[in-house]
Image (cartoon, grey):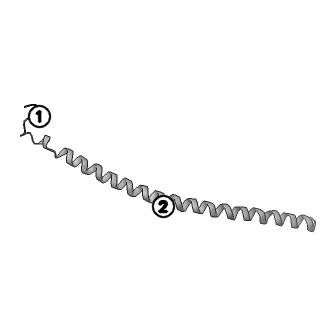
Amino acid sequence: MSEHDLERRVEELESQLAFQDELHAQLNKVVARQDRELALLIAQVEVLAARLKDLGDTVSSGPGDSGDEAPPHY
């Protein structure tokens, strides 16, 4: 292998490394953004689950369950 071939291969490897470094940086940004979005979505689901539970508790303990009240058509 000649010196010229060796230099060309080294330049190609350096070019590939630069591309991979840039790609790595971009993917890091995407992963960080997705981590923030996931944390926000988890918090929103927890809030909605609590609201749904409260709503279920309200419905199950509402006035229609007492049995003492007359139906609305009376």
Q: In the rendered image, which residue does mark 2 sit on? A: 36
Which badge, 1 or 2, is on the more N-terminal residue?
Answer: 2
Q: Which amino acid does label 1 sit on?
A: Pro
Residue 57 place in picture, x, y as percent: 21, 49
Residue drawn at (79%, 64%) of the image: 13
Between label 1 and label 2, give the one nearer the viewer: 1
Residue at position x 7%, y 36% in the image:
70
- Name the secondary structure under disc 2: helix
Q: In this view, does 30 lie above or below 65?
A: below
Q: Which residue is drawn at 29% across and 49% down?
A: 52
Q: How many labels does the image show?
A: 2
User: Which label number is shown at residue 72?
Assistant: 1
The residue drawn where x is 72% and y is 61% is 19
Q: How crowded is mark 1: few (under 14 residues within 10 Å), some or many (20 or more)?
A: few
Q: What element carries label 1?
A: loop
Q: In this view, does 50 lie to the left or right of 29?
A: left
Measured as percent of width and height from the top left, residue 54 is found at 25, 51
Amino acid carrying mark 2 in the image: Arg
Mark seen at residue 38: none
Report x, y in % for residue 43: 39, 58
State the residue lying farthest toward the front: 73
Residue 11, picture quadrant? bottom right
Say above or below: 44 vs 67: below
Q: Which residue lies furthest to the right in this view?
A: 2
Specify the quadrant that holds the C terminus.
top left
